Image (cartoon, rainbow, N blue to C red):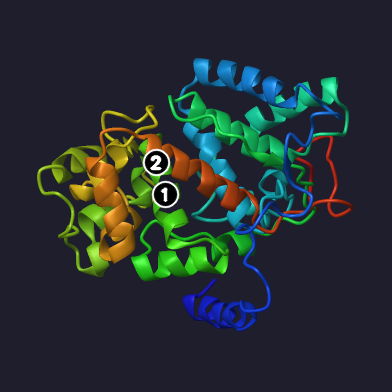
Amino acid sequence: MALDVILVRLLIVAAVASVLAAPGRAGATAGLAIGFYNETCPNAEELVLEEMRDIVHKDRSLGPSLLRLLFHDCFVRGCDGSIMLKSKSLKGERDAIPMSISLRGFDEIERIKAKLEDACPLTVSCADIIIMAARDAVHLTNGPRFPVETGRRDGKVSSCADAENDLAPPNANIVDLKTYFSFKSLSWKDLVVLSGSHTIGRAECAAFAADRLYNNSGKGVQDPTLDKKYAPDLRALCEPGNKTDQTKAEMDPGSAYEFDLSYYRNVYSNKGIFVSDQALLDDRWTHDYVARMAAAESPHEFFDDYAAAMINMGRMEVLTGDNGEIRKICSAWVD
């Protein structure tokens, strides 16, 4: 949504903050629990991990893609599996341009869902499968495997307009980024920690080349903050003026399938691929976190922080109890 609309809504949030606790801060959101399926589908998490091992073994690029799918699901209407819904009129979340055009992993979520339906019919939600698969994507790239809360139910609404409004663009500055996250009751720390997800995966040139390489601020120049020795490597990949360039560049060069601290070292060295990565250096708190992780000898602090931030994100606007539904097929038609 337009930034001015977000700011208006933030004022509303601030007005009630003294009365209502911010979601995802004190205790679990009602209806969510670690081990929610222990009695109804005791092998659910193991089945997800088993499928994820095979998926990532066959195509390691699907791990980061499934992690990205979680972000798109949670930031639009909350973590409710609505990213999976299909629209015949092309007005669903997965139809949003340019936010969703390169999303992958839909078939893999459906594959995992089919396994769980065989084991426990109409029990495990698509929303929970997405978050478990994303957690295991991190684990299978040598990141932490942390407990995740489950118990979400699936949403029935999927809107292209919501996706276009609620997802921060890759060229967002730090003020905009903090505003988007604040509106979702996420903190500056959640922002800088979850940005660390860019330690794995690749990005299409169309998502960053114009802003970082060729037309920064509409001036027809390279972003002056981008490391000048690194820029030629990106220029060799990305065609100038091609707004649909699907050529992919590693978001964490040389370590694109290793969940580690090198993302923060690259950002601190002005080698972040997105404007939004570079923007983390423009705020005192996020800058200090990037600097500390860049200098850290061990990833343990980052891993602990990441697990906590994923819990916070996973609590956003969830449907539990009698709300929503448990779909047999995640990619159902919404219209």
Query: Residue 220, position in %: x, y?
Result: 19, 63
Q: Nearer the viewer, mark 2 or mark 1?
A: 2
Residue at image coords 27%, 58%: 287
Residue 156 in view (yes/no): yes
Q: Hey, what amino acid is under mark 1? A: Val
Question: On the picture, is 285 further left or further right than 186?
Answer: left
Please identify the residue farthest to the front as the structure is shown: 26
Question: On the picture, is 270 further left or further right than 257?
Answer: left
- Secondary element under disc 1, as helix, strand or loop, is helix
Residue at image coords 28%, 65%: 284
Vertical placement of residue 111 versus 86, above or below = above
User: Dot 1 corresponds to which residue?
Assistant: 193
Residue at image coords 58%, 44%: 70
Query: Residue 278, position in %: x, y?
Result: 27, 56
Query: Residue 34, position in %: x, y?
Result: 70, 38
User: Dot 2 corresponds to which residue?
Assistant: 302
Q: Residues within 10 Å of mark 2 (few under 14, many from 20)?
A: many
- Secondary element under disc 2, as helix, strand or loop, is helix
In the picture, the quarter occupied by the N terminus is bottom right
Give the mark count. 2
Q: Which of the two residues, 322 or 80, is positioned nearer the viewer here?
A: 322
Vertical placement of residue 181 versus 270, above or below = below
Q: Which of the two residues, 327 or 286, is positioned nearer the viewer here?
A: 286
Examine the image and state in which quarter residue 50 appears. Answer: top right
Between the C-alphas of marks 2 and 1, the distance is 7 Å
